[in-house]
Amino acid sequence: MVTGSARGSPEPASKVAPRNVGGLDVKDGGTVTGIVRFKGAKPEAKPIQEIAGNSFCKQCYPDELPLHDDFVFGRNGDDDTLQNVLVYVSKGLGGKKFDPPKEPAILDQVGCMYTPHVVAVMVGQTLEIRNSDATLHNVMTSPRNNPPFNIGMPSQGQTLTKVFHHPEFKMNFRCFMHPWMSSYVHVLEHPFFAVTAVDGTFTIKGLPPGQYEISVLHESWLFEPTLALAKVKLAAGESKKIDFTYRPRAVAK
């Protein structure tokens, strides 16, 4: 479904932060928190030079061009961290069924960039795609397990809603009008997931008592986790901390 308004000139929209808190608000639910750190040499993010050739997009960045956001590093205390890592329950729910969240997940287009860069939704949950720019965007994706689409969004303030019915990792969203624009959407069978913030933090709450495997996933092939999954046992109302670390991927010689 697409809705919109006439093109106008409101104040520039703010970028949307990753949703690093996920799960359910339930009594006596268990909670998993943690940090995704990064160890080793960090590659340097490059400016998106193509923006300089687009009159509308260039005016969004009068001082300096934005950086490619396929990897974003941050800090937590003395440690480097990695943003936009999907952290999710990969085993332990035993076929339990959960209703999708009523609140939509948001994917906006601000300054000719998708924001947040990584979004996670549950099967059946609404993804609300917004155009906060006063220019034409064209949202397109070619998933493996869900129907593809390619829809123009010409109006500032326009919204498009999508619901995905099959689990799928790393659905790549692009914009035909602005080829540098890229975002990833993960679709999961349950609500127990989060995407790390710039400080590497995540929280998954509302887990039923049980033993779980928690996994991580980042879009870039340049990095790999030292431990791809962690096991945790939760009692009712219990909280536990699990940390992960990514490093540069070892290249075979």
Image (cartoon, rainbow, N blue to C red):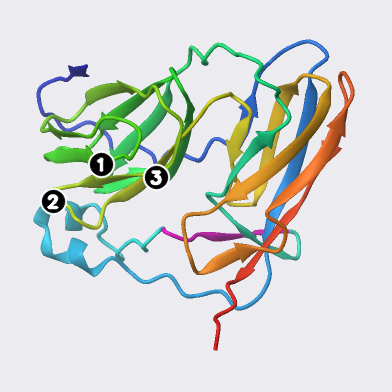
Q: Quadrant of residue 82?
A: bottom right
Separation of disc 1 and disc 3 at Cα?
12 Å
Residue under label 2: 56
Query: Magenta stretch?
Result: 70-76
Can you give x and y, in whole percent of width and height, for residue 156 in the image? 17, 30
Of 133 and 149, the residue lying toward us: 149
Separation of disc 2 and disc 3 at Cα?
24 Å
Classify 10 Å Cα crowding around label 1: few (below 14), some (14-19), many (20 and above).
Answer: some
Classify 10 Å Cα crowding around label 3: few (below 14), some (14-19), many (20 and above).
Answer: many
Q: Which residue is painted at 47% across and 28% down in the image?
A: 121
Q: Which residue is painted at 13% across and 29% down in the image?
A: 155
What label sits on residue 142 in the rendered view?
1
CB-based contact (under 8 Å), mark 1 and mark 2: no
Can you give x and y, in whole percent of width and height, for residue 5 in the image? 14, 20
Q: Earlier in the sequence, mark 1 or mark 2?
A: 2
Can you give x and y, in whole percent of width and height, for residue 76 in the image? 71, 57
- Whether residue 25 is situated above or below residue 87 in the rendered picture: above
Q: Earlier in the sequence, mark 1 or mark 3?
A: 1
Q: Which residue is painted at 43% across and 70% down in the image?
A: 45
Residue under label 3: 184
Secondary structure of the residue carrying numbered label 3: strand
Can you give x and y, in whole percent of width and height, for residue 71 in the image? 48, 61
Q: Mark 2 or mark 3: which is in front?
A: 3
Residue 111, visible in the rendered structure: no
What kind of residue is marked 3? Tyr
**Quadrant for the C terminus in the image:** bottom right
